[in-house]
């Protein structure tokens, strides 16, 4: 049964951001409402991050801070108690556990399934899922018409773009190895069936995706050499049990007014103080987290570009840390020599018979070619928005319904997540959240940020036309 005449909101994307936007709309609406979650690929709620079936892929955040609902901070912990394998785990231990990501995918799926129903008789809310790819949006009255890959259309009053991360950028020479058995262009697609019996495996990148690949290779019994390559040669660091640092941030300093240079000096001062006290300076990054989006918003574009070029690699290593058990496996592999780090730029890939040639350029300008029995592109999501390979996002840019943000890292939005069109006017029907806002907010990829966005955009859409305030994206964090 459908509810004609009632407001219809379409959410495009079934990862965390899209699923939780739809869930929040369903659970908070006090008036009749139609919600359609349009999703292609991974099952709703799982997306790339939680679609893994590998038990060794763990969350990068302890269970205590993984509630999908900002207004119910213990929700995930309470949900875990409904599963027999966690029912008797002591509370203190459960809160600090880094659980398998597939379990978190079960959690999000359960939320979606709880609220996905034809019509809630109490308030007339209809929440349905549509397995389809959206190829284009076009105006339809005061709303929009979604054109789907199956040839059908769907009309909505409001649309939320929650399309998630882009696949990795294409490397020079990718067209020469596109169908090569030893090349994997997307680390989130199947490559386990192509693991060689001999030779070296080369992972392009040294971030979280590379760590996933390393841990999976170990779980599958790989005993050969793994090479991980990136310009900076830095691997993610481990989570640690820290102590509170009452001296940072200083009570009398507004971090957003310091600019990049001033903030850098302040961070160096406090990191040196912590090192001198025998403490991990990474806790400064943790203490910055509630302020990061406001600081980024106050930077000039020149400061943002300098940060990305000079500091982002180190920031990501400290900010996006991994479970201690995972870090120990990686550290042991480095110590044994099974895992080798190479600091170099990847300048291209090419076929070398049954292998892949990975062309590298060191900092001193020297070039080498490393032979790989399997090469996996783990360089992370492509972040140049104007070069998106998404048919839908390409169409929105081409037809002027959206424009890149000033950093070309995502889509330009207003403070309440309304998309800004090519003429600089806010859309009356189109909103965006998640990694699409990386250039606007910088921190826009992890659950503690995304759950706040999903709640706020739902509240904005349910409000009687009053936009959310600029500070709507600031939420509280548990460190």
Image: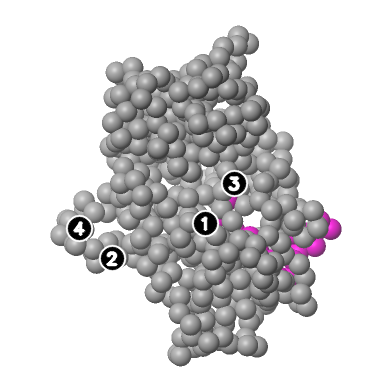
Front disc: 2 or 3: 3
Q: Mark 2 points at which residue?
A: 78
Q: Mark 1 points at which residue?
A: 41
Q: Distance between the residues labelled 2 and 3?
A: 33 Å
What secondary structure is marked by label 1? loop
Residues under numbered marks 2 and 3 in contact, where contact means CB atoms less than 8 Å apart: no
Q: Which residue is drawn at 54% across and 63% down?
A: 39
- Identify the mark nearer the N-term, 3 or 1: 1
Query: In x, y percent, where is residue 424?
Result: 81, 58
Q: Furthest-bottom residue in view? A: 121
Q: Distance between the residues labelled 3 and 1?
A: 14 Å
What secondary structure is marked by label 2? helix
- Identify the mark nearer the N-term, 1 or 4: 1
Q: What stretch is highlighted in magenta?
A: 420-435
Query: In x, y percent, where is residue 157?
Result: 68, 76
- Left or right of 207 in this view: 460: right
Q: Which residue is drawn at 34% across and 65% down?
A: 75
**Residue 85 numbered mark, or none:** 4
Q: Name the residue under label 3.
A: 166
Residues under numbered marks 1 and 4 in contact, where contact means CB atoms less than 8 Å apart: no
Residue 209 falls within the magenta-colored stretch: no
């Amino acid at each position: 049964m459908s509810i004609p005449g009632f407001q219809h909101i379409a959410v495009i994307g079934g990862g965390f951001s899209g699923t939780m936007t739809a869930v929040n709309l369903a659970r908070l609406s006090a008036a009749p409402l139609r919600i359609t979650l349009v999703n292609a690929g991974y099952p709703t709620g799982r997306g790339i991050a939680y679609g893994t079936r590998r038990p060794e892929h763990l969350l990068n955040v302890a269970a205590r801070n993984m509630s999908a609902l900002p207004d119910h901070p213990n929700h995930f912990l309470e949900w875990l108690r409904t599963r027999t394998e966690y029912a008797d785990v002591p509370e203190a231990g459960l809160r600090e556990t880094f659980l398998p990501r597939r379990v978190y995918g079960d959690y999000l799926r359960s939320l979606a399934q709880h609220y996905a129903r034809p019509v809630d008789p109490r308030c007339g809310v209809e929440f349905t899922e549509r397995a389809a790819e959206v190829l284009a949006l076009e105006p339809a009255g005061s709303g929009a018409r979604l054109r789907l890959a199956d040839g059908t259309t769907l009309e909505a009053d409001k649309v939320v773009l929650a399309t998630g991360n882009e696949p990795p950028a294409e490397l020079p020479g990718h067209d020469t190895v596109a169908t090569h058995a030893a090349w994997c262009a997307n680390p989130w697609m199947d490559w386990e069936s192509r693991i060689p019996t001999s030779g070296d495996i080369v992972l392009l990148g040294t971030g979280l995706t590379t760590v996933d690949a390393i841990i999976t290779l170990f779980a599958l019994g790989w005993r050969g050499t793994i090479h991980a390559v990136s310009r900076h040669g830095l691997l993610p660091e481990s989570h640690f049990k820290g102590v509170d640092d009452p001296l940072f941030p200083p009570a009398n300093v507004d971090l957003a007014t310091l600019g990049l240079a001033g903030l850098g000096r302040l961070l160096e001062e406090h990191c040196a103080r912590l090192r001198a006290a025998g403490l991990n300076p990474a806790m400064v990054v943790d203490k910055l987290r509630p302020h990061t989006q406001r600081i980024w918003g106050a930077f000039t574009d020149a400061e943002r570009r300098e940060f990305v070029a000079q500091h982002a690699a180190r920031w990501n290593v400290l900010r996006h840390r991994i479970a201690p058990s995972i870090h120990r496996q990686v550290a042991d592999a480095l110590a044994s020599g099974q895992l080798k780090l190479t600091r170099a730029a990847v300048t291209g890939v090419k076929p070398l018979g049954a292998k892949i040639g990975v062309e590298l350029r060191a900092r001193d300008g020297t070039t080498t070619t490393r032979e790989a029995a399997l090469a996996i592109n783990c360089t992370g999501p492509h972040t140049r928005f104007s070069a998106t390979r998404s048919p839908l996002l390409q169409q929105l840019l081409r037809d002027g319904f959206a424009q890149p943000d000033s950093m070309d890292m995502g889509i330009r939005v207003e403070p309440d997540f309304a998309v800004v069109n090519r003429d600089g006017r806010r859309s009356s029907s189109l909103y965006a959240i998640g990694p699409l806002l990386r250039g606007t907010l910088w921190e826009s990829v992890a659950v503690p940020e995304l759950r706040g966005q999903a709640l706020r955009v739902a509240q904005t859409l349910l409000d009687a036309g009053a936009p959310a305030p600029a500070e709507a994206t600031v939420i509280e964090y548990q460190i």
